[in-house]
Image (cartoon, helix red, strand yellow):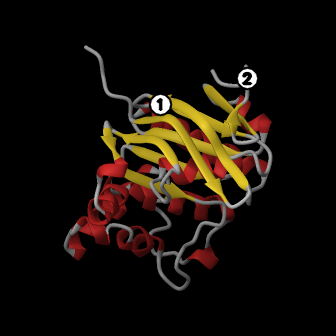
Amino acid sequence: METTPVVELREVTKTYPGVTALDAVALTVEAGELIAIVGPSGSGKSTMLHMIGTLDRPTSGTVLIEGQDVSRLSDRRLSALRATRIGFVFQQFHLAHGVTALDNVADGLLYQGMPLTARRRTARETLERVGLGHRLDHRPHQLSGGEKQRVAIARAVAGDPAILLADEPTGALDSVSGAGVLDLLRELSGHGTTVIVITHDRDIAATLPRQVGMRDGRIAVGAAR
């Protein structure tokens, strides 16, 4: 039985005054894939993240998330899609200072409409899943860089999104912590989450099952596989 791709870009172009950030890009990502979108600064990979994450709309072309054409969704439905089906992880963690790891993750579930007790229960289970069951009551300043990124990943996946977008997730980490984060992303992919890593680091990209190379707003010939 044919399945619907989790992400599909059809001839997606994004232009700004004097700049073509994406130029007729076509990409299909299936459920459970772990891929790297890799390229230098200015290649279009961050704009690709904005398109997939529905943070911006294309100038032309079509973006489908789980078969839904996002251009046909109202702002309210688009926000709901983003809140429930897409998780984001960034290089700088973006954790709330002075708030425990447990509540950083629980607060990420506010848009799910769960009561506080359910949010905290889910947060606890997710932090245990990423190996931080012993750090629930620690605040960001009490955590290592690798632990902070694991909290950020837990916050992103606690609501069981279909897609996890990780933007330079190891950029602020040492090599050992970075390798641990990549192992966690592989584990999440193995359990069915579609994981898309945006990176400039070709060595990191080479460790992932599929790489999509970007250059000058296009998928580089011979770089996508």
Query: Residue 185 lies in what quarter of the image?
Result: top right
Q: Assign the N terminus to one quadrant of the image.
A: top left
- The three-letter code of the residue at mark 1 reads Val
Query: Residue 63 lies in what quarter of the image?
Result: top left
- State whether residue 100 is above or below residue 160: below
Q: Is residue 108 left or right of residue 201?
A: left
Query: Residue 6 lies in what quarter of the image?
Result: top left
Which of the two residues, 142 or 62, is positioned nearer the viewer here? 62
Q: Is residue 180 left or right of residue 65?
A: right
Question: Which residue appears at 24% of the width and 75% of the height?
Answer: 116
Residue furthest to the bottom in view is 98
Which of the two residues, 218 or 190, is positioned nearer the viewer here? 218
Task: Report x, y in % for residue 110.
Answer: 30, 72
Label 2 environment density (alpha carbons within 10 Å; few <14, some 14–19, many ≥20)? few
| SS at badge 2 | loop
Mark number, residue 29: 1
Q: Is residue 179 left or right of residue 25?
A: right
- The three-letter code of the residue at mark 2 reads Val
Q: Which residue is mark 2?
A: 221
